[in-house]
Each structure stands twice: as structure tokens, then as C-alpha cells.
Amino acid sequence: MKNNKKIKICHIAHRLTGKSDGVFTHLKMLFELLDKDRFEQILMYSGNEKNINSYAETIGVKVYNIPELNKKIPLKLFPKMLFYLKKEKVDIIHTHLVKPYIFSGLVNLFLNKKLIFNYHGIFLSKKYYSKIERIILRFLLNTLKLNKNNKLAIAPSKISANELEMEYKGFKKILYYYNGFKVNMNNQVDQETLNLIKKNKKDYFLIGVIARHEKQKRLDITLNVLKKLIENRLNVFFFFIGDGPQFNETKNYAKEIGVTEKCCFIEYLNNLPRYLYLFDLILFTSEWEGFPLTIWEAMYNEVPIVSSDVGGIKEIFESENCGITYPFADVNKCVNIISDLYFNREKLNELGKNGRRAIIEKYNEKNFKEFFVQLYTEILNEK
């Protein structure tokens, strides 16, 4: 490959909203950090979101909206994807989540381009896909083995890479990286929301719940934790920040168990890191994760995290002493951890300062960028 030739990368994803989803936040880091004189990036995704499209246009990323990526039997997808990939003469196809990887891999049987699967915490989960879907997807995955270029995966932590390897043996190589935190100098905030958070901070121990309202986030468990903390007479207040298909369901459950006076729901908050410093704690109750990007943001803002022990979260918490995990769905254990931190502000501050230091020294945008520059360059030069 000539040094003056740009490397053209096509990212393929589905279920992007451009709001509270971690995949899009990950993509934004790639779009903004990779040098435009060395890399040209394209996005193909299943939606047609105005905020995503306008953002991509602003930073010079071409977008193809392909709704067929969401179809169960996407017959029209394959010729369309093949046409666009050939037209753009891409060098690398970087896929996010399982279906885009499988569909792209089938198309790549005819293109023979370098293909990357980006693991974001779920593969062929029994909780996420039906039995029939898993059988079909597993069959298609085996078909992809016909092309040696379809055997590279990356994961957002060492533990996540190990989990993926245990679930699927079809990848020849699985590499891991750490997203870290990209410092955004945009100071824009919604003053009304900022004032609301500040007002509650004067009276309560503030806990932030930053998550899309989807089944894997298990926000029903979060509300049960809140209920238990209230029963234990802890002066806490929860801010739920995020949209999603179960938004109203979560609000209704809060009403059902009688905790609405001690929580607030905000569907979407632009420039989230500019608010995080106000929280005493961030809480995750997810059933599965790769590595939530909010954790990096919280670490940068010196906010400790309590999370269910899923994905690669424990790996970072133990090595950096910036958060505490508990067994998934163990409400009592979670409540005990929060209670200990509630009464031990010295420990709370220590966890926060450790997180900030780790971001600055290790999990920064420089290391993230170097991983992907090296990844893209090396795989393209492989014979």
C-alpha cells in the first residue's frame, strides 16, 4: 500500500439513535480522532436519524441509510450493500454488533475485503435472540469461515475478549482495547436541567443512572435498589438519564413501587460529561455490557461507580480502584455497597480521584487513537 493513499473504512451498524447509545459514542471518537489525511470513514446504518446525519455531514463522514439492516430476512440488503461497498472502494469493513457483522461477512465473500467484528458486550445471547434466531445466525456465522478475512474481532476490554472467545471459536484473532475518554471542550449545557440537578444536590446524595431504557439495562432492578435505600432511610435521589423503548415502562414501575418522589427521568441530555461532576455516584444494574462509555466519563469527572459484575467492568475497577461491582441482580449487596459509600465520604473521594488519575495516565484518547491507527494499518498490510 502506498503511503499517500488514504485508508478507507466503512463502519456498519444498526440500532443507532445518536443519543444514549454507546456504539455511536464509540463511533464519534473514531470519526473525530483519526487523521483525515490518512483515513476516510463512511457510515452505513439502519436508521435515518437527523442528528446522526447532520453530525456526520459536519465532520465530513459520508452516510448511507440502509433500513434493511433491521430486517429479519433482509433479501434486498445484500445487493444494496454490495453496490455501495464496491462504489466506495473501501479497504476495511468495520462492523458493530452481530447482525451487521454477519450480513457484511456474507457480502464480503464476494468482495474479499478486510473485515472487523467489534464486540460491544453481546454475541448470540440467549436473553437477546430467540432460539430460532440463534440457530440461523450460528449457521450463517459458520458460512463466514469460508473467507479468511472474516476472522478478526476486537473487544472493549481483556475480559470482554475472553468472553467472546468462550462463546464463539470462529475468530482467528481477538484483540482488546479500552475506549477511554475523549475530552470535549464544548461547555454547552441546558441551564434548566443543570439548575434542577444542582437544586437536588443541595438536599440529597445524588446517584446518576445513565442508560437507555432497554431490557438488558434492567432498570427495574435500579428502582428496587432505590426503594430499598429509601426504606433504609438514606437521603438519596436518582436521576435517570436516557431514552429507549422501555422509557414509559420504567416510569410506570417507579410509580407502582412508590419511589417517584425520589427520582427524576430525563430522556436525553446532550454533552452529558458536563453534568457528571454533580453526582456523588453512578449506578449500573445491567444484565450484560461490553464496557459502558459513561464509566470513562464518570472516572474523568472523579465520580465513583457501582456496577453489576458484567463485561469488562470489574477488570478496570480492580486494577484502578475507582468503583465497586456486585453480583448481577443482587439488590441487597448493591444497597450495602451504596450505603457504605454514603457514610464513608473519604472512600468515595478516593475512588473518584483514582478514576481521574487512571483516565489521564492510561485510558486517554491518545492511546485509543494509537490502537486503531495500528489496527487499521497492520491488517491492511497483512498478506
Image (cartoon, grey):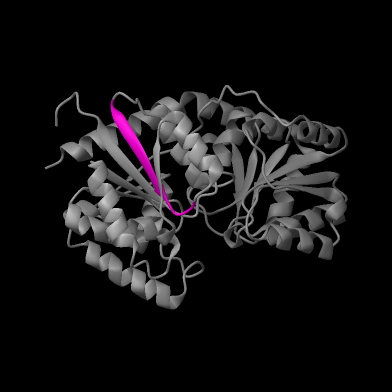
**With 28 as the anchor, is 337 left or right in this view?**
right
> Which residue is found at the position 41% from the left and 54% from the top?
66
Quarter of the picture containing the N terminus is top left
Front one among 71 and 135: 71
The structure residue drawn at horizontal position 53% and vertical position 57%, both measured from the top left corner, is 288
Q: Is residue 239 visible?
A: yes
- At 84% from the left and 37% from the top, the residue drawn is 200
Residue 55 rendering spot, x and y as whole percentages: 50, 35
Q: Is residue 310 left or right of residue 347?
A: left
The quarter of the displayed image where residue 350 is located: top right
Horizontal and vertical percent position of residue 145:
21, 62
8 relative to 202 in the view: left or right:
left
**Position in image of residue 363 (x %, y %):** 47, 31
Residue 147 position (above or below residue 365): below
In this rendered view, identify the residue nearer to me: 354 or 52: 52
- Quadrant in which the C terminus is drawn: top left
Depth check, front residue: 128 or 352 = 128
Tell me the residue at 82%/45% (across/down).
Answer: 236
Q: Which residues are magenta?
A: 38-47
At which x and y percent is residue 65? 43, 50
- Secondary structure character of the magenta stretch overall: strand
Indicate whether residue 44 is drawn in magenta.
yes
Quarter of image, res 192: top right
In the rendered structure, does residue 168 fall within the stretch colored magenta? no
